[in-house]
């Protein structure tokens, strides 16, 4: 007898140990390339190794979505075990992963719901956990898919970039922007909105940037029934824990998860980055 649902995601999602061990959760790794060296995100390289290699080579690697064949192979292997697949991927405006997965699913001829989460990292994690929780409650595939789609637009997030030099080396800042930003101690706050990364604000000093982000959190707590929030960090766990303390002072019953930036995202976000991410909705999972 087939199992009901296989849950598929990609390596830009943060997976807790519980999710890693879940028998029905499968992760397809993105690819990271240092020159001629190719690695699978979370399989043959992790975020700590990424930071070390970037310092060693003084260069920013490139990343790529998994090959269509990688998805097709996985779906072929699993289609005799599961009735249906629920597939959650990084925003298709940020990566070609969604498209490659869809092509692989169609080649394999599986029954599936494919979701553009319009986010990455913990935002994907929370959707995955919500879906698994609903499945455990006996909800139908239609009910689960509908609920997850409803959650997506309620995402709120603020990303404090810690390393302008990495954005510069990766071609995301011009020479003039990099020099001016460094001289003026500019701390850009970015935001993933509708699947795209935009500049939310440019602030002078990290202290002021942190204060602004905490004010935005306080506003959200006053308006919405928020149960979970992730503090995401690029090799800054101690500072992430300090943010957690500030958040719990505002909202004592909040569950705050400390989430390291995954390997692929480390390439783009950079060491030293801090972020907060949550859904303005009551999460069950």
Image: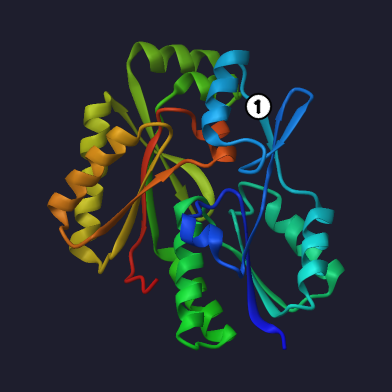
Residue 178 point in image, percent of width and height: 47, 16
Residue beneath disc 1:
61
Q: In this view, does 198 lie above or below 91?
A: above
Residue 64 point in image, percent of width and height: 71, 40
User: For this view, does 148 lie left or right of residue 81?
Assistant: left
Residue 205 vs residue 275, the one in the foreground: 275
Q: Is residue 255 above or below residue 243?
A: below
**Residue lying at 54% horizontally and 52% vertically, measured from the top left:** 13
Q: In which quarter of the image is the N terminus?
A: bottom right
Residue 55 vs residue 203, the one in the foreground: 55
Residue 30 vs residue 221, the one in the foreground: 30
User: For this view, does 159 lie left or right of residue 114?
Assistant: left
Say what secondary structure mark 1 lies in.
loop
**Residue lying at 27% horizontally and 27% vertically, measured from the top left:** 206
**Residue lying at 57% horizontally and 29% vertically, measured from the top left:** 50
How many numbered marks have been drawn onto this rendered protein structure? 1
Q: In which quarter of the image is the C terminus?
A: bottom left
Q: Mark 1, residues whose alpha carbon is within 10 Å: few (<14), some, or many (≥20)?
A: many
């Amino acid at each position: 007898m087939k199992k009901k649902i296989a849950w598929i995601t990609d390596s830009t999602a943060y997976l807790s140990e519980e999710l890693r061990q879940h028998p029905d959760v499968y992760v397809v790794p993105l690819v990271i390339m240092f020159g001629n060296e190719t690695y699978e995100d979370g399989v043959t390289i992790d975020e700590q190794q990424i930071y070390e290699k970037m310092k060693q080579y003084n260069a920013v690697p490139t990343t790529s979505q998994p090959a269509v064949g990688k998805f097709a192979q996985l779906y072929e292997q699993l289609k005799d075990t599961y009735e249906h697949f629920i597939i959650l991927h990084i925003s298709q405006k940020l990566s070609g992963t969604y498209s490659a997965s869809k092509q692989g699913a169609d080649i394999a001829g599986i029954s599936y719901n494919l979701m553009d989460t319009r986010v990455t990292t913990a935002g994907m994690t929370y959707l995955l956990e919500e879906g698994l929780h609903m499945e455990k409650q006996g909800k139908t595939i239609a009910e689960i898919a509908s609920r997850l789609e409803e959650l997506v637009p309620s995402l709120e997030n603020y990303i404090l970039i810690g390393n302008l030099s990495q954005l510069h080396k990766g071609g995301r800042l011009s020479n003039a922007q990099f020099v001016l930003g460094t001289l003026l101690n500019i701390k850009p706050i970015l935001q993933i909105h509708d699947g795209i990364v935009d500049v939310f604000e440019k602030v002078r000093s990290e202290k002021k940037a942190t204060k602004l982000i905490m004010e935005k959190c306080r506003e959200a707590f006053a308006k919405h029934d928020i149960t979970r929030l992730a503090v995401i960090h690029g090799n800054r766990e101690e500072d992430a824990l300090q943010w957690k303390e500030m958040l719990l002072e505002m909202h004592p019953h909040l569950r705050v998860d400390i989430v390291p930036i995954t390997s692929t995202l480390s390439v783009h976000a950079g060491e030293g980055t801090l972020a907060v991410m949550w859904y303005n909705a009551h999460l069950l999972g």
